[in-house]
Image (cartoon, rainbow, N blue to C red):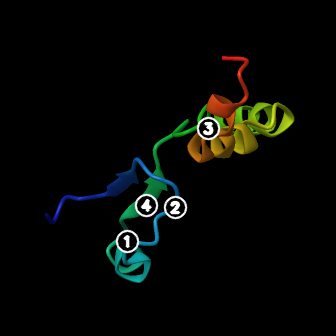
């Protein structure tokens, strides 16, 4: 690929690319612009809500059969 001038990666980081060789061959390496800009906030807020509502403990109670024994459901 003698005309290759850009490697643009749709991922976080570019550790799978031989940067030294790209430099020698004048090939630019970059991430896709705007990649994953929305994906960090959503899981962060989901985790905040899950912790606030004790969802992990509630899940374990369901697994252990505690909810079924409570008589409220």
Q: Of 30 and 10, which appears nearest the observer?
A: 10
For discs 3 and 4, the disc positioned in front in the rendered view: 3
Q: Is residue 60 left or right of residue 34?
A: right
The answer to whether residue 55 is seen in the rendering is yes
Per the model, the C-alpha gap separating discs 1 and 3 is 46 Å
For discs 1 and 3, the disc positioned in front in the rendered view: 3
* Residue in the picture at 13% in, 64% down: 1
Disc 1 to disc 3: CB gap under 8 Å: no
Q: Residues within 10 Å of mark 4 (few under 14, many from 20)?
A: some
For discs 3 and 2, the disc positioned in front in the rendered view: 3
**Mark 3 or 2 closer to N-term?**
2
Give the number of marks.
4
Would you name the residue on which mark 1 appears? Answer: 17
Would you name the residue on which mark 2 appears? Answer: 13
Q: Vertical placement of 16 versus 11: above or below?
A: below
| Residue placed furthest toward the right | 52
Per the model, the C-alpha gap separating discs 3 and 2 is 39 Å
């Amino acid at each position: 690929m003698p005309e290759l001038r850009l490697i643009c990666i749709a991922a976080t980081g570019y550790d799978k690319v031989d940067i030294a060789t790209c430099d020698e061959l004048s090939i630019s390496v970059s991430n896709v612009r705007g990649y994953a800009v929305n994906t960090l906030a959503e899981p962060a807020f989901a985790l905040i809500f899950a912790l606030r509502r004790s969802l992990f403990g509630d899940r374990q109670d369901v697994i252990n059969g505690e909810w079924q024994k409570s008589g409220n459901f």
